[in-house]
Image (cartoon, helix red, strand yellow):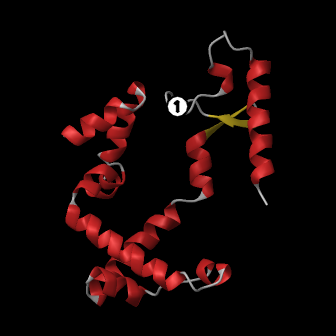
Amino acid sequence: MTLLEEQNASRVPWLVPVRHARMRVSPFTFYRGTARIMATNRRATATAVRSYRRAMAEYAPMGYLDVWYDQFTVEDLQAANHVSAAEMAKRVKGFSSKARKRTSLQALTKLVEEVDGRYRIRSQPPLLVPLRELPDEASPAVLEEVVRAGFEQYMETLP
């Protein structure tokens, strides 16, 4: 708890409850949100460092495309996690089922609403706030220009 409280001190205060809610979803989301706790576990850190060094040594002599297209098999994953073939098949089936449910259409229905035949961003404060709901101190035209400029800068970074 002390590590979490220390991390919270440097975070945006009104987003801390959102972070905690996300961490409660599953053990995976908890640990994803608590990298610092994992880093303080020396044994886990030493294992991760060894794995990273081994992977980097393997990838270092390879070309960019070879690294990009590197793959591992279910058997590789099974061996790395020390699980039986039956357990690995069960896990893959579960992941596959979950992935099929998470489509762009599912995301669309979650993030937007249809109003007068057009889609617009659904309001879900404090995480997702459409420009139309921002305080009056910021003019909508100025906000739109800032957002457009940000997208243009982002586009310039793409190949």
Residue 61, horizontal then vertical, whole percent: 57, 86
Residue type (three-letter) at the residue carrying disc 1? Gln
The quadrant the C terminus occupies is bottom right
Disc 1 on helix, strand or loop?
Answer: loop
Residue drawn at x 58%, y 50% as measured from the top left: 107
Q: Which residue lies furthest to the top in this view?
A: 137
Q: Is residue 45 above or below residue 104?
A: below
Residue 147 in view: yes
Residue 133, horizontal then vertical, whole percent: 63, 20
Residue 108, horizontal then vertical, whole percent: 62, 48
Residue 110, picture quadrant? top right
Relative horizontal placement of residue 37, taking residue 59 as reference (left or right): left
Residue drawn at x 38%, y 82% as measured from the top left: 77
Residue 44, horizontal then vertical, whole percent: 25, 66
Q: In this view, does 158 lie above or below 96?
A: above
The quadrant the N terminus occupies is top left
Q: In this view, does 53 lie above or below 9?
A: below
How many labels, in total?
A: 1
Relative horizontal placement of residue 63, taking residue 81 as reference (left or right): right
User: Looking at this view, is 77 or 88 the one in front?
Assistant: 77
Residue drawn at x 34%, y 32% as measured from the top left: 17
**Mark 1 crowd level (few <14, some 14–19, many ≥20, 10 Å Cα):** few
Residue drawn at x 44%, y 65% as measured from the top left: 98
